[in-house]
Amino acid sequence: MILRARGLCRLTPHRACESPRAFSIQSPDSSRLQLCPEIVESTASSCPSDTIALSFFLWEIVREQQAVGCSVKAQTFMVLIRVYWRGNFYGRALEAFDEMIKQNYVPNTYARNMVLDILFKVHHFDVALKFFRDTRFPNFISYNIVLSNLCKSSDWLGARDVIREMVKKGFHLNTGSFSVVLDCFCKAGRLMELLQLLALMIVSGKQLTVAIWTILIESLCQAGQVDRASTLLGKMVEHGCSPTVMTYTSLIRGLFQAQKFNEVSMLLETMISNKCSPDLVFYNVLIDCFSKARRFDDAIDVFLCLGDSRLHPDAYTLSSLICTLCSSGKLRLLPKLIAGLDVTADLVACNSLINGLCKAGFPFEAVEAFVNMVNMGFSPDNYSYAGLLNGLCMSGSIENAVNVYNTIVVNNPNVDAYVHTVILNGLVKRRRYHMAIRLFRKAALQNYCLDVVSYTIAINGLFRGHRFDEAWHLFEQMKHFDIVPNLYTYNVMLSGSCLARDMGAVKQLLKEMEIAGVDMDHTSFNVIICLLIKLHRYNSALLLCRRMCDLGMVPNRITCSLLLDGLVNISVEELYDLYPKLAYDFKNPSFVDNSPSDLQSDLLVCSAN
């Protein structure tokens, strides 16, 4: 049974008047409670909800049926399961389902769908998937429940497999299901799968909704195909779909990332002329984008527009504003800018200030802000401690940072993984690799909360400390502990393997990435190209560089310089004739990523030797 096998009956808090066990199916002789109108009225009036009161009467009906010798029908249990399911009393619903099976009834697909939904909602994904596979006759709703929950958990591979199975069995997805899966593919950065599913949707005769147009525009922007996204906005209007503020937000963010500021201005004018009112998210994105583009005055002007729009800034708004003011050297304007606004000096705002100061390169001010926060009576949380540790590391107070960290974990061994990550990252950035590894191993030994980012930073420290074998051992160890490597992890491993000039390890990692469905990004390409240059395999490096450009990514400036320096047997003009797209990227600095990773910088230094 589901309850006994998984202990799910403990998932719902016990309340005296909601528990069916108080009125469970039993013979009349074993009952100690003799009902009367007064008891019924008292019980019903004390129930906190109509759902619980109804379940009370339903269980009494079941009991009375047995008392007069009537068998309890399956439909009775169906009603009980549905009542509990609708009332969010999931443990009780599962009890009713198990009781139904005890009475030798075989639950139909509708009953199993309710239980399937419950299992997902109580976060028993593996149990839910097994329960789904054990359903003899799953219907569209069964598949849709699984599909939506896989998308919620960002399992795009699982969602893709379920869609294929649905199509194979003749089920037709509705527009809502298409939207959910397309959004999942978009968030996972899977443009190819998104376009394939979109094609299936169009072939199936479904119309594109505003939400689906927006998802497609967002995906193209994420892939760096901003021109196509802009064209798509025009087609969206031609097909009679009016863009929403979410649509404009996605495209404007993409235009900023592509540094197409003139088009941003035109799009803003179009948005205003179409009477599309900006929301707080839109303003937050604008402030953040202007700040990253170092157009600080524009970012401040956008913040000032909030008052005219009668919108109140949230923690993200304050964080972006603080970062803008710090970067522009205008932090003194903060009190004046927020004066008269509905801004509460709460813990979130204090944390935004501390972390904003760190990001802007003001570590001493960040530590001072932490002290002021404590003096104001706020109790620091994980983000507060992370900001303090980051500020101490950035200011060079390594010993103080380590002492504070040790105090934190002694007082709170269950501190969030983010705190461990911050101290490890701070030490690695200050080139205190061995100290970082000692702290990591101590944290692992004490069974502290460590996530994929913590492991990745520790691996980074080992590589940068030239402890290559230990780095590989830790990489295998994290997989053994079911901590799944992400793209950043693989990039660190690729960079470290290239630093060690281990081409075999690079090939192994690329194969693992392909199996795991992790695509290479510009960092992956850059470090491998640098390794090929170091090994004097210039033609292979050039071909890989061309493939990188064909995928919409560009090499950074140092990679381009090394590649051109290595091509001694070919002139720059001949190179441009052979690879015009590559030449265009080389000639235009605005299209070239100018920030190689720390590990790649180490690799480049070695390649010069």
Image (cartoon, rainbow, N blue to C red):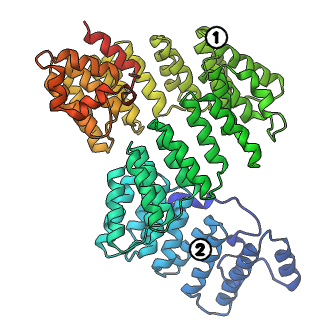
Q: Residue at x 69, y 30 (%)?
A: 351
Q: Estimate how packed mark 2 is, as few (under 14), some (14 to 19) or many (20 or more) residues with alpha carbons within 10 Å.
A: many
- Residue 193 position within the rendered picture, expressed as x and y whole percent measured from the top left: 33, 55
Disc 1 residue type? Asn
58 lies left or right of 552: right
**Which one is in front, 238 or 77?**
238
Q: Residue at x 31, y 43 (%)?
A: 516
Farthest top residue in view: 609
Q: State the residue position of label 2.
A: 96
**Which one is in front, 97 or 336?**
336
- Residue 327 position within the rendered picture, expressed as x and y whole percent measured from the top left: 62, 22
Disc 2 residue type? Ala
- Residue 1 position within the rendered picture, expressed as x and y whole percent measured from the top left: 50, 67
Q: Residue at x 42, y 51 (%)?
A: 229
Quarter placement of the C terminus: top left
369 lies left or right of 172: right
Q: Is residue 118 visible?
A: yes
**Which one is in front, 1 or 495?**
495
**Which one is in front, 153 or 322?**
322
- Residue 330 position within the rendered picture, expressed as x and y whole percent measured from the top left: 70, 21
First-in-chain label (2 vs 1): 2
Q: Residue at x 42, y 18 (%)?
A: 461
262 lies left or right of 295: left
Q: Is residue 406 visible?
A: no
Q: Which is in the foreground here, disc 2 or disc 1?
A: 1
Which secondary structure lies at badge 1?
helix
- The mark found on residue 369 in the picture is none
Q: State the residue position of label 1.
A: 400
363 lies left or right of 465: right
Residue 184 lies in quadrant: bottom left
